[in-house]
Every structure is written in C-alpha cells, then in structure tokens.
Amino acid sequence: MEIKIGVRSVHRELVVETDLTAEQLEGEISAALSSGSGVFTITDVNGRKIIVPVASLGFIEIGEEEARPVGFGGTL
C-alpha cells in the first residue's frame, strides 16, 4: 500500500510503501490525531520508521490496495 504524506511548509510530499491495509492505516492515523503524543509514526516495507509531528501534517493520501493492470493485454 502506498501512502503520500503532505507536510506543511515542505514542497515535496513523503511517499511511503507499507504492508498495512487501508483500514489499518486509517486506524493508525486516527490514533495519532487523538493521542497526546503529537506524532504520526509509520514503518515502511524496508523497516524504516517515518515520524511526522501531527501539527505539521497537511494531508495523507492512501493509495489503492491492488495495483491496476497495465498494458493492452487482457484476459478473455
């Protein structure tokens, strides 16, 4: 699952590939926003941790769970 994280006052967005489902991501985001810790933390598929202060979050875009088929070939 790919997510994009927009950080305020930063021109580039963070793109993170994770093994979590969309529902799990929504739960993690909700927990971070409601907790008193003030940070959103996610671990990517390579084991790296990304920590963003909740006050700096601009947006979080959750991608598709399944990749779309590419090309002109199809199944009959």
Image (cartoon, helix red, strand yellow):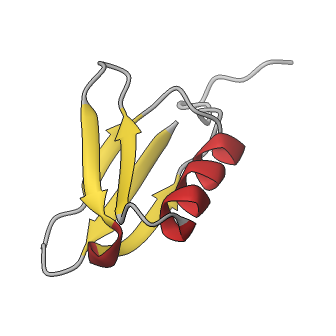
Residue 23's spot in the image, x, y percent?
A: 71, 46
- Outermost residue, bottom direction? 9
Residue 34's spot in the image, x, y percent?
A: 56, 69
Task: Please give left or right for residue 1 compared with residue 56 in the image.
Answer: right
Tell which of 47 and 76 is nearer to you.
47
| Residue 53 location, quadrant | bottom left
Q: Residue at x 27, y 34 (%)?
A: 49
Residue 18's spot in the image, x, y percent?
A: 45, 31
Q: Residue at x 63, y 54 (%)?
A: 26
Quadrant occupied by the C terminus = top right
Q: Residue at x 64, y 23 (%)?
A: 73
* Position above or below: 8 against 15: below
* Position above or below: 45 against 2: above
Task: Please give left or right for residue 74 compared with residue 15 in the image.
Answer: right
Tell which of 34 and 27 is nearer to you.
34
Task: Please give left or right for residue 25 compared with residue 10 in the image.
Answer: right
Residue 71's spot in the image, x, y percent?
A: 53, 30
